[in-house]
Amino acid sequence: MAQQLKRYQERLKPVVTRILLLGMFATGLIAQFVKPIGAALSGKVYLGGALLSLVGYMLYDQVKELSSSVKAPGRALVNSSELGSFVSEAFEARKVEISFLGYTGETLYNALYHRLENLFDNQGSTRRVSIRMLVPDFGLPMLVPSKVDANDRPEDNGALRRRIEQRCSEYDDMLSDLAARLTAAGRVVVHCEYRLYPGIPRDKICIFNRKRVLHGLYDLSARMHYMGNEYFDPKGYRTELNVWSQEGTAAAEAAVATWNKHFDDLWDLAPAPQWRRQTAA
């Protein structure tokens, strides 16, 4: 509601400005020829002021157009903790498409879960939601995440991988359950799917409605302590993300197109996770 009011106020400003400029022009012009009005205003340069107002009115559209074309650049770097604002903005569209490639997607999951829950009470303009999550194949040996050995080197640890895989499986279950219940309600169609890519979680990529891309690199040297042991464990919520938008420069638009194709290609090659194959069986 607040956003709608703000947009209405922005649309109203040009109209009010034009009315004021025309009013100044009309008042100055009348005061030049109608003596009582001129005397009441006690001015001696009515015609000049009126003409100046008219020039301002004529130039208003050109100035407005110029100012809108020279937009201040959007923020080029954001923190992963700010993903919620990008999710909310994406859900203003009728068709929502959010794609992720990274580690566990925990930060994005939290924002998505709460936003999907809100659709039960207020779906707004949203009619269709598609969520694609690409996470590492934790069934394979990995350098990161891993246990730090006696030589301060990464040592594959199956127990750690299974614990993180279980976390991703739970996120998948929660989002898929919400998607099924929202779709069953009949007002909005929601689809959520997880797939796997091989390798370490190096890149963090979030794509919103194929128009805005956030990309950053995980800190692969980050560590955590658990049950007396030390592990290499990237901290996704600390990752800073570069932002590209279709509303930006030609270079930014080209970057958005490249990231979309890159993700689509990876998605087409990626298999379903073991936990989904077990459910299907």
Image (cartoon, rainbow, N blue to C red):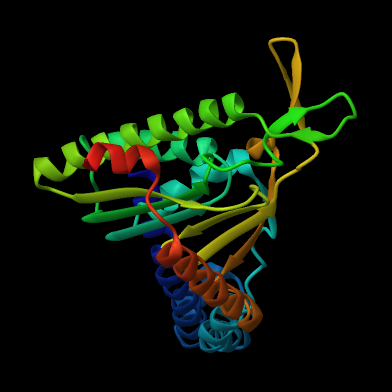
Q: Is residue 210 visible?
A: no
Residue placed farthest to the right in the image? Answer: 151
Q: Residue at x 41, y 63 (%)?
A: 209
Q: Is residue 34 left or right of residue 248?
A: left
**In front of the other: 23 or 174:** 174
Q: Position of residue 148 (x, y in %)?
A: 79, 28
Residue 23 position in % (x across, y down): 44, 75
Residue at 84 percent of width and 34 percent of height = 153
Q: Nearer the viewer, residue 163 or 60?
A: 163
User: Residue 264 appears at what percent x and percent y?
Assistant: 45, 68
Q: Quadrant of residue 252?
A: bottom right
Residue 276: quadrant of the picture:
top left
Residue 73 seen in the current view:
yes
- Taking the image as shown, residue 2 lies to the left or right of residue 228, namely left
Residue sitting nearer the eye, 240 or 177: 177
Can you say which quadrant of the picture contains the C terminus?
top left
- The N terminus, quarter of image: top left
